[in-house]
Image: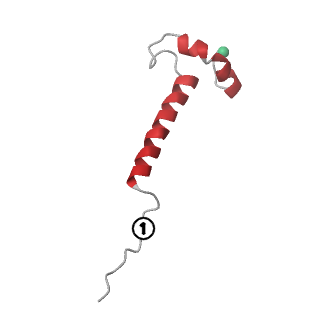
Amino acid sequence: MPKAQPLAVPAISRKVLATATGVTGLLLLLAYLVAFDQGAVSQSGMLLHELMHDGRHLLGVPCH
Ligand SMILES: [Zn+2]
């Protein structure tokens, strides 16, 4: 009797899924630090805010 084949095959491997999840998390953290952080997470006071200031205005993020 032939061995049964699985009906559903994962579209991506666990390794690709883990990598994509990690990269997405890092990009979300970067987006937060660039767009919304006021020193609470970065612990740099307003340094990061000032460095990203033009980018914030370019992206239309509320700033001041
Ligand atoms: Zn501004």
Residue 57 in the image: x percent, y percent?
A: 69, 21
Quarter of the displayed picture in which ligand 1 can be seen: top right
Amino acid under label 1?
A: Val
Q: Residue at x 37, y 77 (%)?
A: 5
Q: Is residue 32 left or right of residue 22?
A: right
Q: Residues within 10 Å of mark 1 (few under 14, many from 20)?
A: few
At a point 47% along the width and 34% down the height, the residue shown is 26
- Mark 1 residue element: loop
Q: Which residue is mark 1?
A: 9
Q: Position of residue 53 (x, y in %)?
A: 64, 16
- Quadrant of res 9: bottom left
Q: Quadrant of residue 41?
A: top left
Mark 1 vs ligand 1: CB under 8 Å? no
**Count of marks overlaid on the render:** 1
Q: Is residue 23 or residue 39 the one in the foreground? A: 23
Which image quadrant: the C terminus? top right
Q: Nearer the viewer, residue 44 or 40?
A: 44
Q: Is residue 19 above or below residue 57?
A: below
The colour scheme applied to this rendered structure is secondary structure
Q: Residue at x 54, y 11 (%)?
A: 47
Residue at the farthest left position:
1
Image location of residue 29, percent across then percent down: 48, 30
Expressed as whole percent of the image width and height from the top left, the position of residue 54 reads 68, 18
Q: Please tell me whether residue 1 is drawn above or below residue 43 in the rendered image.
A: below
Picture quarter with the N terminus: bottom left
Q: Nearer the viewer, residue 62 or 22?
A: 22
Q: Is residue 31 left or right of residue 17?
A: right
